[in-house]
Image (tube, grey):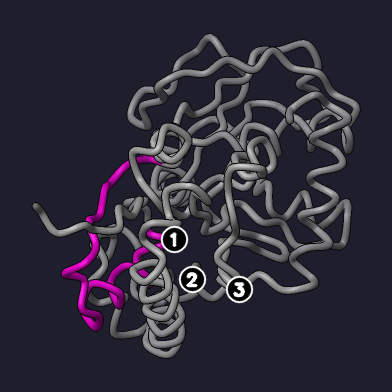
Amino acid sequence: MPEQKLKIGKIPYANLFPIFHMLERECDCSGYEFVEGVPSALNQMLRAGEIDVSPSSSIEYLRYSNEYAIVENHSISSKGCVGSIILLSKKPIEGLNGLPVLTSSQSETSVALLRIVLEKFYKVRCNLRTADIHLDSLPSVAEAYLLIGDDALKAVKSYELQVTSENKNSQLYIYDLGELWHKNTGLSFTFALWIYRKDCCKEKAELLERFKNDLNGSKKRALENFKIIASESPLKGILTENELIAYWENISYDFGDEHRKGFELFRKFSGELGLI
């Protein structure tokens, strides 16, 4: 009979690179099987029981909280700019009412947050459309585009380089959704939580406890070694080491009382808009 393994979702974005880098480098992962995917895909796999534990969209937990439990003290959150959840717009955000906005198919929390930002904070209703957005040819059918993860980091970096060159592009407005949430609420925003299936992990209790301990240690070591980790990041040729370190330092990987206040407000707004 094959050895039972804990199936762990792995998001291949820069925001979680420090955690996974330390986890795979420093820990005995022989009892783990890593399954890579974008947040929306991992949400589906977790829901279907194809993986056991994963960093997952916070709205996934809100929608199916009876099926999941939270790995305590772990999240991807920000109190202000997050750097990788970005709305690129040809118009000021106040002028987007009634216009099409393209959103990434990779994330669900970010799309929910965008609706909250637009409708709750700016009283703007847009036609949100899911699309595959390619940075080298942003489509002309929409006035704005929601990008997440490494795509967002690359887009902002590319635009900054373009506007400082002689071939300056037309004006784009760049909105960081973490910053807009904090500006309007004064609270942090939790984009993802580490969650696990209650039923799947009953039979893997020892492996789960081992993983929780490994995750705690990996987070601690990651926070102490951003400079070393930056030199090994897949994005090191696109962002400088200092830019990567600054990006990670803006992220909170904890989930304490202050995070929960923002999370509960996100739950409230999501319920009012019918998102959960």
Residue 179 visible, this angle: yes
Q: Are marks 2 and 1 in contact (CB under 8 Å)?
A: yes
- What separation in Å lies between label 2 and label 3 (alpha carbons)? 17 Å
Is 107 one of the magenta-colored residues? Answer: no
- What separation in Å lies between label 2 and label 1 (alpha carbons)? 7 Å
Q: Residues within 10 Å of mark 2 (few under 14, many from 20)?
A: many
The answer to whether 229 is drawn above or below residue 187 in the figure is below
User: Closer to the N terminus: mark 2 or mark 3?
Assistant: 3
> Measured from the top left, where is residue 261 in percent x and y?
84, 62
> Measured from the top left, where is residue 90 in percent x and y?
63, 26
Q: Residues within 10 Å of mark 3 (few under 14, many from 20)?
A: some
Q: Determine the secondary structure under disc 3.
A: strand
Residue 266, numbered circle? none
Residue 92 picture quarter: top right
Q: Which residues are magenta?
A: 14-38
> Measured from the top left, where is residue 206 in percent x and y?
37, 71
Residue 41 picture quarter: top left
The three-letter amino acid code for the residue at tag 2 is: Trp
View extreme (bottom): residue: 224
The three-letter amino acid code for the residue at tag 3 is: Asn
Residue 207 picture quarter: bottom left
Q: Determine the secondary structure under disc 1.
A: helix
The three-letter amino acid code for the residue at tag 1 is: Asn
Q: Which residue is mark 2?
A: 248
The residue shown at (44%, 61%) is 15
| 5, 232: nearer the viewer | 5
Residue 15, numbered circle? 1
| 133, 165: nearer the viewer | 133
From the viewer's perspective, tell me whether residue 68 is left or right of residue 48.
right
Q: Determine the secondary structure under disc 2.
A: helix
Q: How many marks?
A: 3
